[in-house]
Image: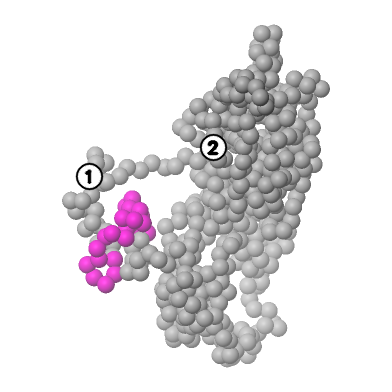
């Protein structure tokens, strides 16, 4: 069987790169044509990518969480010779032709509808398999949709600018040698969608309708945002690239010393691109809930002072002590070690893989991971935490699919309170604020006390308010009894 390389596909205008989210097949696995083999994420959506061939997967050329250029090689597979030809039971007489209904495809999680932007082929035109035949727009992206077969376009079942449900009929094509149910009796959901009115349209449809997708992409390549694009006058019935150029050359656009352009550009750092991808993924999926408590910070400061006065090589920071308090709470709260797989499966790991956000120069951010954190004693935990955080400070991001909880520490930046974000597969993020002098929570007594705000952000899809409060109060209790924990 011949070996072929599969590449990251181009699924929308203006997209330059994608992140390999997950591989769905392993080397040696047999793959059917059109079977999902990996997941990729652009800045617009997460989607399954299907195999264009039948055969056997040989090797992956990139690891999950790698950012790849569009068109980059991602895997190698042995292609079964003749596998792309129609199977005998699916063939008809050579002269026969069947009508095939084209449907709006599902290209990302959670998408319910799409707008038919433009048809690229007219009834009667011949099309090749994988040739773009129409453009669709979701609230994530504008993309070309390719023909699944070679044949002839018979008719379109919806007009451009119609909003259609995912899976709705959009067109009919005649395919040689394909046995398929006649399309003439298929009732198109396009009619229902077009009659539903603007109330069902996604936010993307509310934009100007006289801006072709390619013009919008051209404008964005020139540094213009959507608000600016909305304000540019069109010389004709549609906004064209020439209108963009006229706007940029006009007196209303300030020039800078960047070669006459109104902007400067630099490539986003690779670590920030990875973080951005994770954050966008979280924004699509997570339903966040946030709460906080005030913890007595005095016990940690007291223990830190004692350790420092004793000298020696073992000098754990106050933050390391706090992280240990978080890790110990996971013993009694399995939800801290749990993630959501798909829409209905809870996966609980045997031990906590504790993430710690580590800031790098240039406002970059990576994650250190303390493996099996809840199973470690105090000294072993502190030593492993130091090693892992040092590794992160040298640029090594350690986050994995098993990192269900992370800590973000703003104690050294003058921030007392914040709403941390949860990034899947994580389900909890713990926030530690700057210590301050407040009042002890003792009825009838006014006594100063060193305090720190400890916050928790939960993914409400699998953790409810009481569950989050139980985790937070357990951490607070550990902070206030750190001496006992550190001597066990």
For the C terminus, which image quadrant?
A: top right
| Percent x, y of residue 14 | 42, 57
Residue 366 in view (yes/no):
yes
Q: Which residue is more in the foreground, 467 or 44? A: 467
Q: Is residue 375 left or right of residue 58?
A: right
| Percent x, y of residue 246 | 21, 58
Q: Give the CA distance from mark 2 to mark 1.
A: 38 Å
Vertical relation: 342 (above or below) 388: below
Check if residue 376 falls in the magenta segment.
no
Pointer 2: what residue? 418
Q: Which residue does the image show at 79% across and 19% down from the upper left?
A: 487
Dividing the picture into quadrants, the one containing residue 125 is bottom left
Q: Which residue is more in the foreground, 403 or 180? A: 403
Pointer 1: what residue? 255
Label 1, residues with CA under 10 Å away: few <14, some 14-19, many ≥20: some
Instruction: Check disc 2 and report its element: helix, strand or loop.
Output: loop
| Percent x, y of residue 337 | 74, 42
Magenta region: 217-239
Q: Which residue does the image show at 49% across and 53% down from the upper left?
A: 43
Instruction: Check disc 1 and report its element: helix, strand or loop.
Output: loop
For the N terminus, which image quadrant?
A: bottom right
């Amino acid at each position: 069987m011949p070996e072929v390389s599969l590449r990251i596909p181009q699924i929308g205008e203006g997209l330059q790169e994608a992140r390999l989210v997950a591989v769905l097949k392993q080397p040696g696995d047999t793959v059917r044509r059109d079977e999902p083999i990996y997941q990729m994420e652009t800045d617009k959506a997460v989607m399954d990518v299907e195999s264009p061939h039948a055969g056997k997967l040989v090797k992956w050329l990139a690891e999950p969480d790698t950012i790849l250029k569009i068109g980059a090689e991602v895997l190698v597979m042995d292609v079964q010779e003749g596998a792309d030809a129609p199977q005998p039971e699916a063939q008809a007489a050579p002269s026969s032709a069947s009508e095939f209904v084209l449907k709006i495809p599902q290209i990302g999680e959670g998408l319910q509808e799409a707008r038919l932007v433009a048809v690229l082929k007219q009834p009667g035109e011949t099309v090749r398999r994988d040739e773009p035949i129409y453009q669709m727009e979701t609230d994530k992206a504008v993309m070309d949709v390719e023909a699944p077969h070679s044949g002839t376009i018979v008719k379109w079942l919806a007009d451009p600018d119609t909003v259609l449900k995912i899976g709705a009929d959009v067109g009919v094509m005649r395919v040689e040698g394909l046995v398929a149910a006649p399309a003439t009796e298929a009732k198109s959901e396009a009619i229902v969608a077009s009659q539903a009115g603007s109330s069902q349209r996604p936010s993307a449809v509310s934009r100007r309708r006289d801006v072709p997708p390619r013009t919008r992409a051209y404008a964005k390549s020139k540094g213009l945002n959507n608000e600016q694009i909305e304000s540019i006058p069109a010389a004709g019935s549609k906004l064209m690239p020439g209108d963009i150029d006229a706007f940029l050359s006009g007196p209303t656009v300030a020039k800078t010393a960047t070669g006459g352009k109104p902007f400067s550009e630099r490539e986003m750092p690779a670590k920030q691109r990875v973080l951005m991808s994770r954050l966008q993924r979280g924004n699509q999926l997570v339903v966040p809930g946030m709460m906080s408590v005030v913890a007595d910070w005095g016990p940690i400061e007291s223990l830190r002072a004692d350790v420092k006065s004793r000298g020696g090589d073992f000098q754990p920071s106050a933050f390391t002590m706090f992280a240990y308090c978080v890790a110990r709470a996971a013993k009694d709260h399995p939800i801290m070690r749990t993630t959501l797989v798909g829409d209905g499966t809870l996966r609980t790991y045997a031990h906590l893989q504790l993430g710690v956000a580590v800031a790098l120069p240039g406002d970059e951010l990576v994650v250190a991971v303390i493996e099996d954190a809840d199973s470690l004693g105090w000294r072993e935990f502190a030593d492993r935490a130091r090693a892992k955080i040092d590794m992160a400070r040298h640029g090594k991001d350690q986050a994995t699919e098993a990192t269900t909880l992370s800590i973000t520490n703003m104690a050294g930046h003058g921030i007392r309170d914040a709403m941390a974000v949860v990034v899947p597969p994580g389900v909890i993020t713990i926030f530690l604020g700057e210590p301050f002098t407040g009042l002890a929570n003792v009825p009838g007594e006014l006594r100063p006390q060193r305090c720190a705000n400890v916050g928790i952000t939960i993914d409400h899809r699998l953790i409810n308010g009481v569950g989050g409060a139980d985790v937070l109060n357990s951490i607070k209790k550990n902070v206030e009894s750190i001496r006992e924990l550190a001597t066990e």
